Amino acid sequence: MAAKKTDEPREKTDTPRVTTEMVATPAGDARITWHHAPGAHALLAASHGAGGGIEARDLRALAGALPGLGVSVALVEQPWRVAGKKIAPAPSTLDTGWRAVWPALEKAGLPIVAGGRSAGARVACRTAAELGAKAVLALSFPLHTPGKPERSRAEELLATGVPTLIVQGGRDPFGRPEEFPELPAAMELVEVPYGDHVFGLPKSADLDEPAALALITGAVTDWLPRALG
């Protein structure tokens, strides 16, 4: 696949180097925003959901926190987002775009944790085993559509075949933590109290957004060594 990298200007010399890379896929051009960790020992590759992009607060928080701990972060924008479309395509098309980006991710020569939020989490779960991901990070996994718990996507989640961390908002209408099935030993679930599907918090919550994001990044950094073995 054709790929082109460009360096983006940095405001601070002590921040991780950030580059972008365009990757041609059968679904159109995807874009990777690399947050490079000096001396990286692992790579988290994560994509966005069907209703937003890589500017999501949880993805931004991970891209800011992990490089300082030796984990590079590659935020992947699916072709439909790069093309400026507002509606995500079918799941099979999302999988096609993700698979085509994978060789560009492998070029880093690092163990890869496949991740994403919402629809991006589903993509990571569906493709982890075939692509050789070492682990899966599922942010706001959409266990079911709101109001339809009988239409569960638990089978997708349980079939990752690799260590998996689920980070779920306590009041996520797409699946609250207590709605998840019993998880096997290789899967862990961390709750963000009061969080909705985008980890937004009500004014009545006894934690604020920085605390919620710290909970997310802390859970991921605690889990990664166990996941990577």
Image: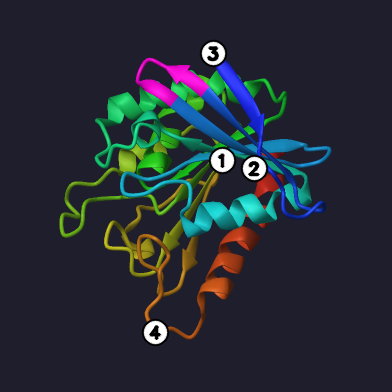
How far is disc 2 from disc 3 in space, using C-alphas? 31 Å
Secondary structure beneath label 4: loop
- Residue that badge 4 annotates: 203
The crowd level at tag 3 (other Cα within 10 Å; few <14, some 14-19, many 20+) is few
How far is disc 1 from disc 3 in space, using C-alphas? 31 Å
User: At which x and y percent is residue 148?
Assistant: 16, 54
- Residue 174 painted magenta: no
Name the front one of labels 4 and 1: 4
Is tag 1's residue or tag 3's residue first in the polypeptide sequence?
A: 3
Residue 130's mark? Answer: none
Is residue 142 shown above or below 217? above
Is tag 3's residue or tag 4's residue first in the polypeptide sequence?
A: 3
Is tag 2's residue or tag 1's residue first in the polypeptide sequence?
A: 1
User: At which x and y percent is residue 53?
Assistant: 42, 46
**Magenta range:** 23-29
- Residue that badge 2 annotates: 227
Secondary structure beneath label 3: loop
Q: Residue at x 68, y 30 (%)?
A: 111
